[in-house]
């Protein structure tokens, strides 16, 4: 014991370099880049700022927030935002999980098929919306109308008859590859010997999926839900390029409502108040999802223990 303590005393102290001067500039740029726009948004949310009457400016307290909260369109946009996020999450995770299980198997041409499946993720959102609007869902020239006529059916104007479902299809088409890649990466760490052992013990395909694959992917699925939720709360381009929030208010989400307040009604103060609500909503959802992830991790650790 005495010899060990003498060695520890003889060991020279570790000299840690001062990284403040290396990290400081990057941290300063990051803070300026992210926080100044947010602080300006909060500043304008408490002021009257109308582009049609720029001379009428001043502090209005919570007037912009009250104006937004008493507007029925705001609550409609909140409901549409939650419906869009929830529906896209369900579609992308279910289809992404199915495709990940498919590409986990060996079959000829798997690399080419995998490249084709993930390609929608690299398409710009506006381009994706125009493809779906003009080449697939157009009631006269679209692929779906052509297929309906072949089978003797009447073409459907999808964006007018099923606007929210059409937006969900567009966004899901883009985000399924994201879920696929993350879930497939999680599956790669699953030992195939474990699945073969379960088959030898008489487990069915459903039992393998339920009791081996799903618990193994619990952490990966939680990460997919968290990341997709954060990004899906800001979906705007697909709605702007396809339905413009309509028909009526059917596809008006919170980001699109903020755009309307700022560039259609020119009420910058109210739009800033909407942006503050968007940040609050994103934080509430993020906290909820992070707690959900924490519970899943604890349950997984408890099950493994």
Image (spheres, rainbow, N blue to C red):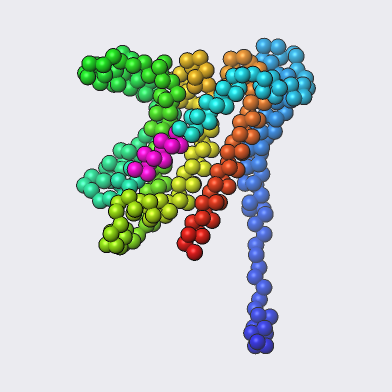
Quarter of the image where one finds residue 79: top right
Question: Which residue corresponds to the image point at 65% horizontal and 57% vertical from the top-left?
Answer: 19
Q: Position of residue 161 (x, y in %)?
A: 40, 17
Judge from the rendering whether residue 128 lies leftward or rightward of residue 105; answer left or right: right
Secondary structure mostly seen in magenta is: helix
Q: Establish if 116 lies above or below 209.
A: above
Q: Position of residue 246 (x, y in %)?
A: 49, 17
Judge from the rendering whether residue 293 lies leftward or rightward of residue 69; answer left or right: left
Q: Establish if 304 lies above or below 160.
A: below
Question: Which residue corresponds to the image point at 30% horizontal and 15% vertical from the top-left?
Answer: 155
Q: Position of residue 99 (x, y in %)?
A: 33, 42
Question: Which residue corresponds to the image point at 58% horizontal and 38% vertical from the top-left?
Answer: 285
Residue 141 appears anywhere in the view = no
| 91 within the magenta span | yes
User: As drawn, which residue projects farthest toward the top?
Assistant: 52
Q: Which residues make up the magenta segment?
A: 88-98
Residue 83 appears anywhere in the view = yes
For the N terminus, the image quarter is bottom right
Quarter of the image where one finds residue 286: top right
Question: Which residue corresponds to the image point at 27% horizontal and 42% vertical from the top-left?
Answer: 112
Quarter of the image where one finds residue 120: top left
């Amino acid at each position: 014991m005495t010899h060990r303590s003498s060695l520890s005393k003889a060991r020279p102290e570790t000299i840690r370099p001062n990284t403040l001067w290396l990290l400081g500039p990057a941290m300063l740029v990051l803070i300026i880049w992210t926080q100044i726009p947010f602080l300006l948004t909060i500043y304008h949310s408490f002021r009257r700022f109308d582009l049609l009457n720029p001379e009428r400016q001043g502090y209005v307290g919570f007037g912009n927030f009250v104006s937004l909260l008493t507007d029925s369109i705001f609550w409609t946009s909140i409901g549409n935002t939650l419906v869009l996020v929830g529906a896209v999450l369900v579609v992308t995770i279910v289809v992404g999980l199915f495709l990940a299980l498919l590409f986990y198997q060996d079959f000829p041409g798997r690399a080419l098929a995998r490249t084709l499946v993930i390609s929608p993720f690299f398409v710009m959102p506006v381009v994706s919306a125009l493809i779906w609007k003009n080449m697939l869902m157009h009631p006269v020239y679209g692929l779906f109308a052509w297929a309906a006529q072949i089978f003797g059916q009447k073409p459907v104007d999808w964006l007018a008859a099923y606007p929210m479902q059409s937006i969900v299809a567009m966004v899901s088409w883009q985000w399924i590859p994201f879920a696929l890649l993350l879930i497939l990466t999680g599956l790669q760490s699953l030992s195939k010997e474990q699945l073969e052992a379960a088959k030898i013990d008489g487990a069915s395909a459903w039992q393998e999926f339920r009791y081996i694959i799903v618990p193994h992917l619990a952490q990966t699925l939680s990460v997919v839900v968290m990341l997709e939720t954060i990004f899906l709360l800001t979906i705007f381009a697909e709605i702007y390029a396809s339905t413009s929030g309509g028909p009526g208010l059917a596809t008006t989400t919170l980001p699109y409502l903020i755009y309307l307040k700022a560039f259609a009604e020119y009420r910058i103060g109210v739009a800033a108040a909407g942006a503050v609500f968007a940040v609050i909503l994103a934080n509430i959802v993020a906290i909820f999802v992070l707690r959900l992830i924490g519970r899943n991790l604890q349950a997984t650790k408890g099950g493994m223990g």
